[in-house]
């Protein structure tokens, strides 16, 4: 069982399109802009790690980056199914840290304003945290299937002891096979990880419904948290208050969580609706949420629409 975290940069495709258009086939310019973009991506990743390290509840040595899919990071963190205290502490810490990571203002600018070609992009993030209780660890199963076939791929039917360990390890690494045990006493296989299963599929379908600058929590994790994440900062406090004006909403301190049902027809291959909770705070959503900057290209329309529906704009807000 593991806590699954998706951290996705919003609007990266249009940003890259504008970088190519501005570069006008000059790859020196395009590559320079790409370096700037990638540096921003790494700084976002670093900020996530720093919050993880400072949380006190998460052991970063147990955090695993499964893959980067375009501009989306997928992390997993193993938890003990029978340890509810650990699960709540870890889930709470990830939610709290992500709220802070998403609230940090980020902007990427390039171009020449005097020539009318100045671009200012908002680099907002969206995040989903959920619990996956049933998934298959793909690398182990792949290696079990291919273990006795790898030698044949090397053009030999010889025993493993007669194969050059370097060739064996290079092939395993190149084709992403994960040896389940050391190849020799001196050489260990390269450990990799990936997971498959219906809950994993649902996780990524759900991630598409997330809102920029909001942290979304899937129902599987939310129910295990008991809808109670202890106290405000550095831990996010959430307690149930029932319904207000027909909207199922929960409040606590600096955090508000509103429920959304994602219909099955919006999640390819999933045959049931799924509940998520979008968390936000009047203290961490910044002024650009309320007063968009006409010179800043952002993709916060879905967030603004969602907040408007939830009555967030009627709440007294803290500026700055």
Image (cartoon, rainbow, N blue to C red):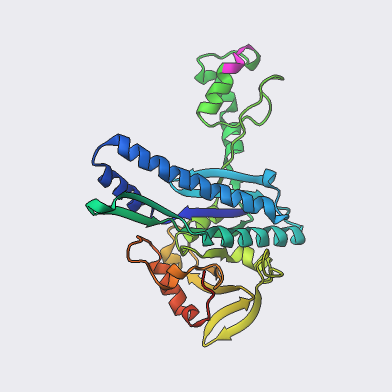
The residue positioned 67% from the left and 66% from the top of the image is 233
User: Which picture quadrant has residue 128?
Assistant: bottom right
Position of residue 30 measured from the top left corner of the image (x, y, whole percent): 32, 40
Position of residue 137 measured from the top left corner of the image (x, y, whole percent): 60, 43
Report the number of numbered marks.
0
The range drawn in magenta is 162-166
Can you see residue 196? no
- Judge by depth and name the residue closer to the eye, 156 or 277: 277
The residue positioned 58% from the left and 37% from the top of the image is 139
- Judge by depth and name the residue closer to the eye, 27 or 84: 27
Residue 230, compared with residue 243, is above or below; it is above
Chief secondary structure of the magenta portion:
helix
The residue positioned 69% from the left and 19% from the top of the image is 186
Position of residue 251 measured from the top left corner of the image (x, y, whole percent): 61, 78
Looking at this view, name the residue that lies furthest to the front: 114
Position of residue 192 measured from the top left corner of the image (x, y, whole percent): 59, 36
User: Which picture quadrant has residue 143?
Assistant: top right
Q: Is residue 209 magenta?
A: no
Residue 127, compared with residue 196, is above or below; it is below
Can you see residue 94? yes
């Amino acid at each position: 069982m593991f806590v699954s975290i998706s951290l996705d940069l919003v609007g990266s495709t249009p940003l890259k399109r504008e970088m190519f258009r501005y570069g006008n086939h000059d790859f020196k310019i395009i590559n320079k802009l790409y370096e700037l973009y990638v540096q921003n991506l790494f700084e976002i990743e670093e900020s996530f790690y720093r919050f993880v390290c400072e949380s006190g509840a998460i052991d970063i040595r147990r955090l695993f980056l499964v893959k980067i899919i375009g501009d989306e990071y997928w992390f997993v963190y193993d938890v003990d199914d029978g340890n509810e205290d650990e699960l709540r502490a870890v889930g709470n810490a990830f939610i709290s840290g992500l709220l802070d990571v998403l609230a940090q203002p980020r902007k990427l600018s390039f171009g020449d304003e005097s020539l009318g070609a100045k671009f200012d992009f908002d680099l907002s993030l969206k995040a989903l945290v959920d619990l996956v209780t049933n998934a298959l660890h793909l690398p182990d199963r792949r290696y079990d299937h291919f273990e006795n076939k790898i030698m044949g791929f090397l053009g030999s039917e010889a025993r493993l002891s007669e194969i050059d360990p370097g060739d064996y390890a290079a092939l395993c690494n190149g084709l992403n096979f994960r040896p389940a045990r050391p190849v020799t006493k001196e050489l260990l296989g390269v450990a990799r990880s990936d997971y498959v299963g219906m809950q994993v599929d649902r996780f990524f379908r759900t991630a598409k419904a997330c809102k920029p600058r909001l942290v979304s929590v899937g129902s599987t994790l939310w129910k295990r948290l008991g809808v109670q994440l202890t106290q405000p900062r550095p831990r996010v406090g959430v307690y149930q208050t029932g319904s207000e004006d027909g909207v199922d909403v929960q409040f606590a301190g600096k955090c508000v969580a509103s429920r959304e049902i994602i219909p099955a027809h919006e999640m390819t291959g999933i045959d049931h609706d799924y509940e998520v909770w979008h968390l936000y705070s009047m203290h961490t959503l910044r002024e650009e949420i309320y007063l968009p900057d006409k010179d800043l290209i952002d993709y916060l329309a879905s967030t603004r629409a969602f907040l408007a529906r939830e009555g967030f704009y009627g709440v007294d807000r803290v500026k700055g």
